[in-house]
Image (tube, rainbow, N blue to C red):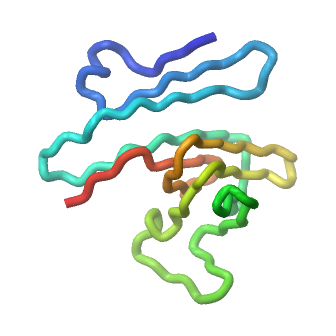
Amino acid sequence: MFLTFFSDSTYRNATAYARVRYYDEQSEADWEVYLSGLPNDNQGREVTVNWKASEIHNNNTFYTDSNGLEMQKRILNYRPTFNFSSFEEVSGNYYPVISAISIVDEKAKLQMTVMNDRSQGGSVVKEGRIELMQNRRLF
């Protein structure tokens, strides 16, 4: 099965769109995100892709890879070596994602992992939702 999340009218004005491939008898899906340039209209813009699994309760904990070697445990608004405080909840909890980011529900024994093909920033700022930054422009 092949799905595309755009229509002709929305694609003409979009800065990004995604194509998704679901395969019969597999629990995996392939996502392809296509980016075009951000408009230069003197406004800051961010393009993110979000994956949501409402049945996963990750308790503000997620995992990102460390240079593609091993998964590091991340907890929202927490640092193990110092007291963390920030007025920027989202940017204060973004981490580099080299090859994977995941959330785990220990009680239900569920896990969702997103594997990317390029280095990106990522986070889990809401319960059960993985967010990867695709493009960003600030003024």
Image coordinates of residue 31 in percent, x first then y, are 56, 29
Farthest residue, direction bottom: 82
**Picture layout, residue 125 above or below residue 84:** above
Drawn side of residue 84 relative to residue 104, left or right:
left
Drawn side of residue 116 relative to residue 10, left or right:
right
Residue 52 lies in what quarter of the image? Answer: top right
- Quarter containing the N terminus: top right
The residue at 45%/21% (across/down) is 5
Front-lying residue, 69 or 51: 69
Image coordinates of residue 121 in percent, x first then y, are 50, 56
The residue at 60%/68% (across/down) is 76
Farthest residue, direction left: 41
Image coordinates of residue 126 in percent, x first then y, are 57, 54
Drawn side of residue 40 relative to residue 36, left or right:
left
The residue at 25%/41% (across/down) is 38
Image coordinates of residue 34 in percent, x first then y, are 41, 30
What count of labels does the image hold?
Answer: 0
- Is residue 61 visible to us here? yes
